[in-house]
């Protein structure tokens, strides 16, 4: 029997039931200082390795989803407009439902059906969907996914890092695009988001993917080099400025630079 147990100050550890149970077996509790996770470094390190190994095993079939809301201008004044965002962990590709002022049960159920249809069209495997405990994720939303042979996993309370990939994308969407605009209604929001998603998929380099776009703009497969031909000379270290072209979206907010075609 251990003499003491060290933990953080999470509600599951400081509850009266836990305290009484430990007192019955004469085990002392040692809590770390608030905001000092390194005082419990061994457990934190194990959690990190466990999370990394879980993602490596399940990334090909794992999706994360979350809501995002932004205040927009309407004829009735400022209103909250909602997006529902899905992210495939292995490929980092996203599916975003059209914006809505009313993310009610019927709407989220409809978006779950649209998400399943999207996964079939794109061929991205789907075995597990993770989301937080937002009350907008209703039981009917989970039921639609389960009917499509998809397991649903809810994140722990107050644990945004559990769905860190989709949270990170939402931060990109906000900081790189939506923060620069006063949005006027659903159509304006959907246009901004569609441009950002196209840039994110087809043009923006991704460090986790060797600084390559997630989806090639051209659907043509890469051409194979004919046998017997020598390899082409490597590109020069310095590319003349005249050989560079700039593609712009949203009035130049989103830019993509590439070499001109030969």
Image (cartoon, grey):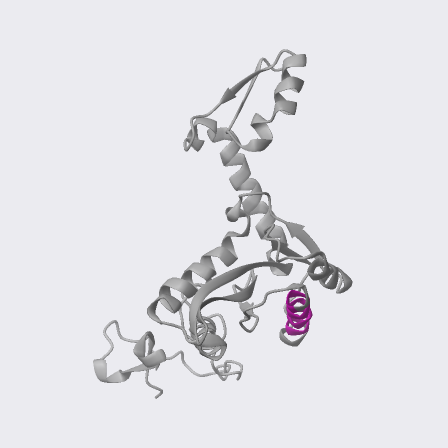
Q: Is residue 37 above or below residue 128?
A: above
Q: Is residue 195 left or right of residue 258?
A: right
Location of residue 108 with respect to 243 vertically, above or below:
above
Q: Residue at x 57, y 71 (%)?
A: 97
Please name whichever residue, 198 or 58, is drawn nearer the observer in this view of the structure.
Answer: 198
Quadrant that contains the C terminus? bottom left
Task: Find the residue positioned furthest to the front.
Answer: 76
State whether residue 235 appears in this view.
yes
In the rendered structure, the answer to whether residue 200 lies left or right of residue 130 reads left
Secondary structure of the magenta portion, mostly? helix
Q: Looking at the picture, how far across and down is residue 193, in whole percent?
A: 46, 73
Left or right, 104 with respect to 174, comes to: right
Q: Position of residue 232 (x, y in %)?
A: 37, 80
Q: Which residues are magenta?
A: 107-119
On screen, residue 230 above or below 32: below
Depth check: give the residue in front, 251 or 123. 251
Q: Could one spot residue 208 in this view of the protein?
A: no
Which x, y percent locates residue 140?
A: 72, 60
């Amino acid at each position: 029997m251990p003499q003491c147990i060290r933990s953080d100050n999470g509600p599951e550890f400081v509850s009266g039931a836990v305290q009484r149970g430990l007192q019955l077996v004469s085990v002392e509790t040692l809590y770390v200082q608030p905001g000092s996770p390194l005082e419990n470094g061994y457990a934190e390190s194990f959690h990190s390795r466990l999370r990394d190994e879980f993602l490596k095993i399940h990334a090909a079939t794992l999706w994360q989803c979350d809501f995002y809301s932004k205040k927009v201008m309407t004829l009735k004044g400022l209103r909250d407009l909602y997006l529902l965002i899905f992210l495939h962990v292995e490929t980092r590709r996203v599916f975003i439902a059209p914006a809505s002022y009313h993310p009610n049960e019927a709407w989220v159920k409809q978006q779950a059906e649209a998400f399943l249809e999207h996964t079939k069209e794109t061929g991205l495997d789907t075995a597990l969907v993770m989301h937080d405990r937002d009350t907008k994720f209703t039981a009917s939303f989970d039921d639609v996914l389960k009917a499509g042979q998809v397991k649903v996993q809810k994140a722990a309370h107050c644990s945004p890092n559990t769905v860190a990939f989709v949270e990170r994308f939402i931060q990109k969407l906000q900081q790189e695009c939506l923060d620069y605009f006063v949005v006027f209604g659903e159509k304006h929001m959907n246009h901004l988001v569609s441009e950002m998603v196209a840039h994110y998929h087809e043009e923006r380099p991704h460090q986790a993917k060797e600084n390559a776009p997630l989806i090639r703009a051209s659907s043509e497969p890469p051409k194979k080099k004919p046998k017997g031909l020598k390899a082409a000379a490597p590109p020069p270290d310095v590319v003349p400025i005249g050989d560079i072209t700039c593609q712009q979206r949203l009035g130049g907010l989103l830019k993509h630079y590439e070499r001109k075609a030969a």
